[in-house]
Image (spheres, helix red, strand yellow):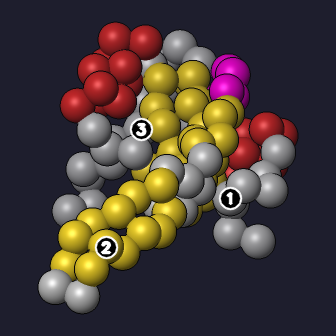
Amino acid sequence: MDIIIRPLITEKMTALGEKLNRYGFVVDKRATKPQIREAVEKLYNVKVETVNTCIYGGRRRSRYTKSGVIEGRTNSFKKAFITLKEGYTIDFYSNI
């Protein structure tokens, strides 16, 4: 099971990373906090202090087309917010 799907790179998460040393990831919905901690520590060579998670349910969406209204849902996903120990950082932009 791939635990970390992708990092969250937004203005808000960048500010949290600079201010509170906190980073966000989209993770597998079945992943537990210890599994997420282990995956981040192994992937980025850092020490994790805390892991907070939340599950976002899919939202209902509709759009108007020539053939009528199409209704559906967006995907649900799980976010993990990782706080690193003092002195550690993650640079997402280093391999671009």
Q: Nearer the viewer, residue 3 or 55?
A: 55
Q: Position of residue 62 (x, y in %)?
A: 35, 63
Distance between mark 1 and mark 2 Cα atoms: 32 Å
Nearest-to-viewer mark from 3 and 2:
2
The quarter of the picture where residue 56 lies is top right
- Looking at the rendered structure, the kind of residue marked 1 is Asp
Q: Which residues are magenta?
A: 48-52
Q: Is residue 38 above or below residue 87?
A: below
Provide the major secondary structure of the magenta segment: strand
Do the residues bearing badges 3 and 2 touch, measured as CB atoms within 8 Å? no
Residue occupied by mark 3: 90
Task: Give me the residue at 37% from left, 24% from top.
Answer: 17
Q: Position of residue 15 (x, y in %)?
A: 28, 21
Mark earlier in primary sequence (3, 1):
1
Task: Give me the residue at 22% from left, 70% from top.
Answer: 64
Q: For this view, does 79 lie left or right of residue 37?
A: left
Secondary structure under tag 2 reads strand
Mark earlier in primary sequence (3, 2):
2
Q: Is residue 69 above or below residue 73?
A: below
Quadrant housing the N terminus: bottom right
Mark earlier in primary sequence (1, 2):
1
Residue occupied by mark 2: 69
Residue occupied by mark 1: 28
